[in-house]
Image: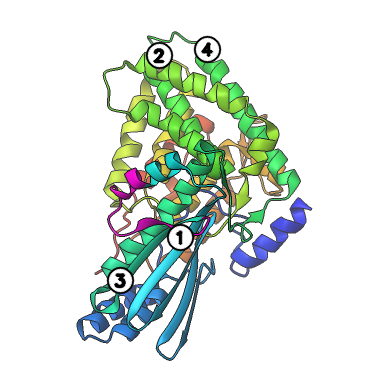
Amino acid sequence: MLNKFLNWVRGKEEPAGKGILLMDFGRYSDNNKVSGKVRRWKDADNLFKEKKYAESVDAFFDYLRDDDAENVRYTREGNHVRFEFYQGSKIIRGEIKENHLSADVKLARMAEPSVPVMRRLLEMNFALYYSRFALNKDELCMRFDTDLATANPNKLYYGLKELATKSDKQDDLLIDDFSSLQAIDQDHIIPLPDDEKEVKYTFMQRWITETLEKVGEVDADKFSGGISYLLLSLVYRIDFLIIPEGQLLNQLEKIGGIYFKKDERSVVDKNRDMIEAFRELKAKPRDEVFKNLFRSKYTFSIVTPQVHKVLADAIHEANENMLWYRDNRYDYFANKLMEYGLSYCQYSYSLPRPITLLIQLFMRVNYPDYFKALGYGETFYDPATNRFREEAIIRYMRTIESQWKERYPYMSFRTETLSFVNLLSFNYSFTTLIEKLNMDIPA
């Protein structure tokens, strides 16, 4: 069943003869608009300035639509428009009539009135800039509306983004915190095959167990920095490769938040709390984990783009911190530090697609058993023999380069700098190659 599903995904996502993707990994990024879509944003802005509001909105939703993901539906009949778009577990529906745009999303069903729930919504309303919480009979909702005369593309983008991203997160939190609330409007969610869920559950358990064992083998004070890197790289690896949703994702985000919370607590104390949180995650019942593994469509990235220098600096810093562990033969720690430099950026920023594909290649080299269990036939590295499939790795990279050369004409993969002596040297040369890339886009 899993192989049949993967073959279907390959047909949907792989350009003919390219041989790059079986399935997507990591968080959705809207930082990969083709030139035609970028022009539609400019069209929307110019048309709005010319007070051609209907045409401006048409252009905006064309910009918003990811044709590959099929995440936006937009239908105009004269002056009346209906639209809907997807954001994870939520569908945002709206219409335009009488020069007014409105959009709504259902959060949860509240069978009986609840003062604590309403108090929570009232408090959260103060943190919203464009949208607001609402109650429609027994349904908790969020709503955004605006007159077309004030609906410039920026207002539409950030208003609809707030509505989409906040509702996708808050529905899970509300249902988790209030037992009286029920999930609603989730028929569009695509369930994963049971064998794929089993693979993801098994490897999440394995990675947590392995990491906690490695952490337990070293001094908690002397290795506090290295332990933090191991724990955080585990957070980002699970996020990228397992792709948790719902309450599982919320739990994972809280673990990462322990370290970055600005307080007076020591790194040792934060590590201890992260370790305990991972133990709780590991103890989560299988059915609870399975319930939060599904596929869904997205329209907005929950993180923002950054210039490549931010990514390069993160990689450089992680690699510099790695050197002590490498020189003192703590290879496991050294490899996870280099993984951290990449995965932190993938988790924290909306990255260009070719960078995400390179990170996926890094993961396929470092975790071949996981990809083999998912149904990937091609293995790039065999840990048992320390052998790399050098030609396959370079061919994969050249394919990415050619696919994205039009958008990133200065991007050049210097594959001659790659080292295939062992995994440690490969990871260092590979992450350094990404650090040195020129990802500038011509004006």
The amino acid type found where label 4 is placed reads: Gly
- Report, in whole angstroms, how far the alpha carbon at label 1 lies from the one at label 4: 41 Å
Residue 321, magenta (yes or no): no
**What amino acid is at disc 3?**
Thr
Classify mark 2: helix, strand or loop.
Answer: loop
Which residue is the site of mark 3?
A: 146
Q: Would residue 369 be seen by someone viewing this image from the given angle?
A: no
Asked if 76 appears above or below 63 in the picture, the reply is below
Across and down, in percent, residue 164 comes to: 42, 58
Residue at image position (50%, 36%) is 177
Mark 2 → mark 3, Cα distance in angstroms: 54 Å
Q: What residue is shown at x 41% (from left), y 23% (from top)? A: 228
Foreground tag (2 vs 3): 3
Q: Amino acid at mark 2?
A: Phe
Task: Name above or below for residue 85 compared with residue 230.
Answer: below
Which secondary structure, mark 3? Answer: strand
Chain-order first, disc 4 or disc 2: 4
The residue beneath circle 4 is 216
Q: CA distance from mark 4 to mark 2?
A: 10 Å
Please identify the residue farthest to the bottom as the structure is shown.
78
| Residue at the spot 39% in from the left edge and 42% down from the top edge | 120
The single residue placed furthest to the right in the displayed view is 1
Q: Circle 1 sits in a helix, a strand or a loop, which is it?
A: helix
Q: In the rendered view, would you say 254 is above or below 64?
A: above
**What amino acid is found at the position of numbered circle 1 in the picture?**
Glu
**Do the CB atoms of the residues marked 1 and 3 lie less than 8 Å apart?**
no
Q: Which residues are magenta?
A: 122-138
Choose between 142 and 265: the one closer to the eye: 142
Q: Which mark is residue 223?
A: 2
Label whose residue precedes the other's in the sequence (2 or 1): 2
Q: Real-space Cα distance between discs 1 and 3?
A: 42 Å
